[in-house]
Structures are given as structure tokens and as C-alpha cells.
Amino acid sequence: MKFITNEKLTIVGAAGMIGSNMAQTALMMKLTPNICLYDPFAPALEGVAEEMFHCGFDDVNITFTSDIKEALSGADYIVSSGGAARKAGMTREDLLKGNAEIAAQLGKDIRQYCPNAKHVVIVFNPADITGLITLLYAGLKPTQVSTLAALDSTRLRSELCKYLKLPTSKVENCRTYGGHGEQMAVFASTTSIDGESLSKWIESGRIPGADWDAIKLRVIQGGKNIIDLRGRSSFQSPAYISIEMIAAAMGGKVFEWPAGVYVSDKKFDHIMMAMETVIDKNGVHYKEPNGTAQEEADLERSYEHLCKLRDEVIEMGIIPAIDQWNKINPNIK
Amino acid sequence: MKFITNEKLTIVGAAGMIGSNMAQTALMMKLTPNICLYDPFAPALEGVAEEMFHCGFDDVNITFTSDIKEALSGADYIVSSGGAARKAGMTREDLLKGNAEIAAQLGKDIRQYCPNAKHVVIVFNPADITGLITLLYAGLKPTQVSTLAALDSTRLRSELCKYLKLPTSKVENCRTYGGHGEQMAVFASTTSIDGESLSKWIESGRIPGADWDAIKLRVIQGGKNIIDLRGRSSFQSPAYISIEMIAAAMGGKVFEWPAGVYVSDKKFDHIMMAMETVIDKNGVHYKEPNGTAQEEADLERSYEHLCKLRDEVIEMGIIPAIDQWNKINPNIK
């Protein structure tokens, strides 16, 4: 079995639970033999590198460094879970500010050390915002930066399968759009169950409205549920899916779950959020989803919530006002 | 890409760090679509199952249960990392007794619920002893139970590659035999570096004796080093390698690193330890390694150490005296 590419993949935040799983996943999925693990926390990073060495992967060149210049120089692909976790006493704003600043620095570092990077996947929360900031400062094209959003859609599929006791093959095209968080827009109309639209299942009462509301709530609280059950944040599924995303950008299997993407058109503008997307060798591309009036209103509300977060970050001085974006990234019109 | 088999794989201890990584690894390596996750700790187990659902694997049937009967019924393959970790205040003997009892119960459960299981891989420490106990009580053939031992050999390769700054492809056939622990026998004569025996590299002084001793020490302390660096026990590499072992037993890629295997011949008898092994569709098979006089003395010492542990477990009443083994497992002569 061959590698998808020989180009350099840099995993940022590789000492963490998500990052270390990404390293293993990328090696197992044979993305590339050239993997560089980066984390500012050197001892744990070395521990992760040792674990990877001990797996005994053949014909790979795994390097690790706490020097961001060394990590990013020559990197063609980057995936970052390198945000800070919310700590006791931290407000939501503290977390937003901290991770927004990390994203701004990552973007600047990409521009400085690997301006020819082909694709970047951002995983740390709020990913819609950190991805947007990274894109602005990296100077890349909107097709070159995507963010993890698919987990909400896979959770929707999982909840429907559990509720209906059906195998995943019978529940297709589950989709949530907009933000990744409490304000996500959970669509019913895109999903087909055994060939029939989920909307019809709900309208006909085969899935009672109250049950559908409960399913949506479980999707929205899917991450919180993992913390409650496991005593730690979800790390396996975010790692696995983000490596599928970067694999698609390398030319591997096309990624067809929703991803966060820079959106700029009449309806939604200057924002990063989950749309109907495809990630392939040419990067991430989107089209706007069509839903029922209610679904579109949910999506509009999700968009407005993201605009507020974006404006907070502008207010904090971390990114300039929208009309100045083009000056720091000419690829943003 | 197809699955290796459709037969049922049960992962015991799936809520833990090793077990949950095994689940993801087995799904990614497409061992079988039928994976059952077992752990007595139900909430964390459900959390792991949720993570697997959220990965969005297609066409798989992932089940989870805290009922060992349900977990093992119909299981064709079992991999267990379900031991207890050493806790503060616990002596080495406490740990040995606790995990030996867990292994005895696992063996009895296998005999009761899945006597037709094809292969079992045991990962929890001391694996040489817990594997032996599982084999005795499960009533399986010696070819049907193997234990994780390869990490010491992959660590040897890794340490040599780091020391010599060579890619893994240049450092072949690294081997440690005997016990997995401080008493392992680290062989030099099996390894070839750039086509030449490691023994010659040492004899000629290209690797000074003191450096070789330091390398051996790092191999022996490889697990401790991960704890020091990462603040947690190694879990990614043990999970990955044990899934490679069970994949081989299913008919996947043949596993050629050393595994712990039941050994019974003139020199070593009534013991489980790492030998020169192959795991394939027919189970685990071994031949005794040939080394220098010093290496064979090291292996003899490692064997004697394991005999002492085995005799302690007999003393504790967890397994009967050797001459009674045949009565509980007729496959043991």
C-alpha cells in the first residue's frame, strides 16, 4: 500500500489528545511518509513521537520539534488542533480571545514559513472563528483552509441510527450547517432514511416531533455527552475526521461531509461556516444548502451568531475590520 | 477496501486508553465490521462507542456492553487490555494477584461463552503471566493465545535508528526475547544494520560497548520513559501492535515481530514468553532463538524470572501446580 503523497504534513498540537491521535491516524492511513509533529510542550511531544516510533511503521520519516519555523518550513499540508482548552475560571470570552490569538499567530507563521502550503485544516474551537483568522493571516485562498464541522453531521446520523435501530447504510446524507456549537442548524430535509426524506418521516409522525427535537438536542450536545460519559473531551472522532479531510486535500478519498469554509456571497458574507462542501485535490468548495423555510431560518440565525463572534474578535483587535481584510489577504475580496 | 473477515472481534477493556485506541485502530484497519466493545465501566464505554459512531465509519456493526456473556458469545477473536493499573500503595504482588485473577476469570469466561474462539491476544501486564493464565482456563490450544511483546523489539529498532541516524529500513530484524520487563533479553546478533550484524558493529567498536549498554537500558526503560515524558502510560503503540497481531490471526498481514507464546520444550517449559514467532491464519508459532552465549544466558535468566512469577501465581492458588495443568486444559501436555 502506497502513500497518498510524499509531501510534508505538519501536525500542530501533536502532544495533545487530538493531535497525537491525528499522528497515529495519518500514519495508519498512509497520507505521507513525511510527518512533522509540532507542539510547544516539548516533553509530551517527544513522548508522542516515541509512541509513533514504537508502533514500528515502515518507511516513514517522523520528525518532531517545538520550533515552529522548523515545523512549518516546507510544509505542504497542516492540520492544527493546537488551541487551549477552557480552564477553570476562564470566561467564554477569555477562551475566544486566547484561541483567536493562537490562530492569528498560526496564520502569520504559515505566511512566513510555508506560504506555498496547499491546505490547512483547523480543529481548535471555536473552529469557525479560528479557521477564519488563520485564513486571513496566512494569506491563502479560501479554498485552502477548511475547519472541522462534520462531527455534528456524523452525530446526527448516529442518533438517527440509534433511534430507528437502522444500520448506517440506511441513513444517508445527514447534514448540519452553519456554526459548530449550540447555534448549529440541524437540517432534516437533506437526510434520507431507507430512501425517503427524514422530513417526511417527521411530518407523517413516524418520528414524532418531540422525538425529533430530542434527537436534535442530542446532536447539539454530542460533545458535552462525551465529556459526561468519559470524563474527557472527544478526541478520537475529531482526530479521525480531520485526517480524512487533509487526506482528501492531498488527493485521497474525496471528503463529502460538511466542512467549515470561507463563505462570501449575497446571503452570507465574510464568514467561515459549515456549508455543503467537497474537499478534494483542489481544496474545499461549497454550495449553499437549500432547506425548508424553518431550516433556512435556523441557518440564518447560526450565521448571525457567528457574525457576532467575528465582530467580537474584530473588537478585540485580533483581526481588522472587514473592509481591511483584503489588505492582509488579497485573496479575500 | 474490504474487511479481513466478518467474524466477531471483542475488545475487552474498551473504555481504557489502550482499549479505545484498539477499537479505532481495528475499525480503521478494517479487521471486521463486527466489533463488540466490552468494559465493566459502562459510562466510559458508552463514551468510547459514541466516539466510534461519530467517526462515521461505513458499513460497520459496533456494539458495546458491560455484560461479559453478551460480549463474548459468538466471539471469534478477542483482544484484552482489561487489566488494572498499578495504584498508589499497591505492591508489585498486589498488582500481580489482581491481574492474575482478572486473567483467570477471562479464561473461564472464554471457555464458557466462546469455546470456539480462534485467537486471543492479551495485553495487560504482566502479559507473559496473564496470557498463560488465560490460556490455561480458556482451554484453547497454545497456538490460539499470544501476548504483546513486540514493543521491546520496536523500541530497540527505534533506539538504534536514533543513535545511528538511520531510517528504519536500514535497521532490520531487531529482537528481544523472553519476558517483557526489566528481565527481557535484548539480542544484538539478530539485528542487521545496513546489511551487517549489529554484533559486528559492537565488536568492531563502531558502536562502543558503553553506548550499546545505554541503548539496551533505554529499550528496557522505554515504557517508563513514555510515562516520564507524557505523564501517562504508553497506549498508542500497544494498541496499534496488538491490533496488528489479531489482524494477522484473522488472515491479514502476517505478524513477524516477537509475540509471547506458550513454550514447552526441553530448554524452556510450561511458560509463556517472547520467542521468534509468526502469527498467521493458523495462530502463533515459534522457534527458539539462537544467540551468542551471553544472549542465551540473558534469555535463560529472563526465563527463570518468569518461572518465579508463574510459581508465585501457583502459590497464590490462582492456577494449579504444573502437573495439574493438563486437567484444566487438555491441550497443555
Image (cartoon, coloured by chain):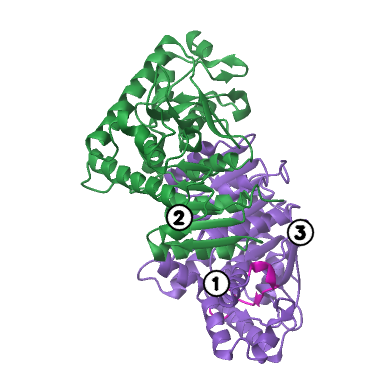
Chain colours: A purple, B green
Would residue A244 be found to the left or right of residue B302 on screen? right
Q: Amino acid at mark 1?
A: Gly
Residue furthest right as drawn:
A282
Q: Nearer the viewer, residue A287 or B222?
A: B222
Badge 2: chain ID: B
Residue to which mark 1 is pinned: A317
Q: Amino acid at mark 3?
A: Asp
Residue to which mark 3 is pinned: A280
Residue at the image point whose x is 51% and y is 15% from the top? B189
Q: Earlier in the sequence, mark 1 or mark 3?
A: 3
Q: Nearer the viewer, residue A3 or B333?
A: B333
**Callout 1 secondary element:** loop
Residue furthest top as drawn:
B204
**Residue B199 to residue B150: above or below:** above
Front: mark 3 or 2: 2
**Callout 3 secondary element:** strand
Residue to which mark 2 is pinned: B14
Q: Which residues are magenta?
A: A167-183
Q: Amino acid at mark 2?
A: Ala
User: Residue A244 location in percent, x, y?
Assistant: 66, 57
Cα–Cα gap, marks 1 and 3: 34 Å
